Image (cartoon, rainbow, N blue to C red):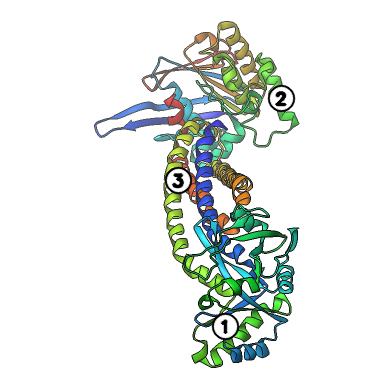
Amino acid sequence: MSLRADRLTLTFSTPRATTFAVREVSLNIGEREFAGIMGPSGSGKTSLLHLLSGLRTATSGKVYLGDWEYSGASPTRQLDIRREQFGFIFQQPFLIPYLHVLENVLVPVETPGPSDIEHAMELLEELGIADLAHKFPNECSGGERVRAAMARGLVHRPRYLFVDEPTASLDSATGNRVMAVLQRQLNHGMLLVVTHDPEMLENANVIFRMRDGVLCDTVRGKD
Amino acid sequence: MARTLPVGGAIAISVFLIASIVTLLNSVDDSILVNYGFLRHFSALTAQFETEPDPATVKAARQAAKPQKVIDSVPYFTTIKTVFGQMPVPIYGVDASDGQELARLTGNRLVAGRWPTPNEPELVLSRSWANNKQAKIGDEIELKHERLPALEQKQKLVGILEGGKNLAITDRSYVLLEMPAAVVRTSLLFVPRSPSQLTEMNNAINQTLKAYSPEHNAYTQLYTYEKLVQELRRTLGFLYTFLAVADALVIGAVALLSGFLANIYFEQRLPEFGLLSAFGFRREKLARRLAIESGALVTIGWLAGLGLTALVFALLDYFYMKPNGLVLASMSRMALVYTLPAPIIVGAASLGTVLLRLYRLDPIEIMERR
């Protein structure tokens, strides 16, 4: 199913002024599309990702999954959708310190079975950190933690994957490897990546450019 | 694991503190009940200001109570050390055959030495009382008591009893020979036909005392185990009220401390809960998980506290109390009951603060804080 935003707006109000983090943004991402959001710091990229994924409630506007208005669903229904169909890779890895890497990867799976564990190990293998599966986060480097967080975002084969600055702390070779793994996500569904780095979006189907909270440009690329 | 130690440790220490206080207070009860445990096998009828109870009353009591046997004794008193200081206990001056009968009745057997020789300053003691007086067979023991009937002369320990209730037996003829006539008090030891008939026998004797010749019997007392327990409860009632207040104060302080510790602990785990919340895990589920974790933590803390108390008191009992013939209460159900509020209140206080924060949790705010 496609992901669609209709005039999404997010404001932060203080007694003196109202600031627009996102203003009247409408966009559409197809079912198996790779989409990118680009823009300078503070342009509202991450806020838009939070609105699209339901992590933040919009001040106004709507989000649709296909024809269904996701943003109008009850909070518990939204949580269920988020848990079952959405995957997240944040700027910081946020690994749970007392779980080892493999357990961290399996966090989104409610009751992991042997096939989930096997899939998690495959992801770790693809990301080049299978040997760290039974190590704790404090025994891993920053880049290794980021890759573990990526495996965690992919492990439950989400239909919608939201990724925020995935390669910020990785060298270019590892970054490319990671992007290849992320793009395989398109076998399952949609991929939305927020980044500063245009190289990462070389294969994107659509790129949205943000500035001052406003969607200023949409570039359609490969189909 | 390491981060749960402060909260678990605080609970364990408070449980240890409370269980120790209760156990020590129970030891006051137990010291009396254990050292006067022989009254579970017979009751003693004594006239306080007469040489012996009124014979007519005794006759009526015998008829009403139908004891298996009444043993003539002349008790005098000595003191033993207890956790609350010196406590008087009786030494029964009885005829030789009655002495052996008393020992048998109270579950004792002579495990070392011999029985006292008539007209000689000799006695047999339970192992515990001999230890308490640091005496071994052949030692001459000072048995004076300042306020109760006692003997001035030292007596030789000639035998050790073991296996039953604490007991001290000496020769009646020697006591009558040495004790000033003015302080001699004959005590009639009423032995029931079976231990289960003790209460029935005591009731019959007390009814006789009330009904029969009250002017003679105003100062005649039947010393029974039930009366001992009742008086203990009355005397120690205030102590237990005090204990409940102390308990509340300790728990209050510990709950406050644990609340702070739990907050610090949760603060460290905020990213974890923020992450799970972002992934779509319902707050109810996170709350349930927290409740299970907190429950496990306080239960482990409680068990650790109880285990620590049991260990410390077992060591104290083994290495100091028993060798000195001192009674130390084992950890009772009462100790468990008094310690229960600690984990419950600490758990509720910690969980309450944490849940409040969980329901206000904004995952984005937490993630952007990094």
Q: Quadrant of the C terminus of chain B?
A: top left
Q: Chain of mark 3?
A: B
Q: Mark yes or no: residue A191 visible.
A: yes
Amino acid tagged 1: Glu
On the image, numbered disc 2 is attached to which residue?
A119
Where is residue B348 shown, x and y percent of the image?
Answer: 49, 49
Q: Quadrant of residue A128?
A: top right
Picture residue at 62% right of the left edge, 58% below the top: B129
Q: Chain of mark 1?
A: B
Name of the residue lying farthest toward the left: A16
**Left or right, residue B287 beside residue A112:** left
Q: Taking B212 as reference, is B34 above or below it?
A: above
Amino acid carrying mark 2 in the image:
His
Q: Residue at x 56, y 10 (%)?
A: A202
Front one among B201 and A84? B201
Q: Position of residue B241 (x, y in %)?
A: 44, 62
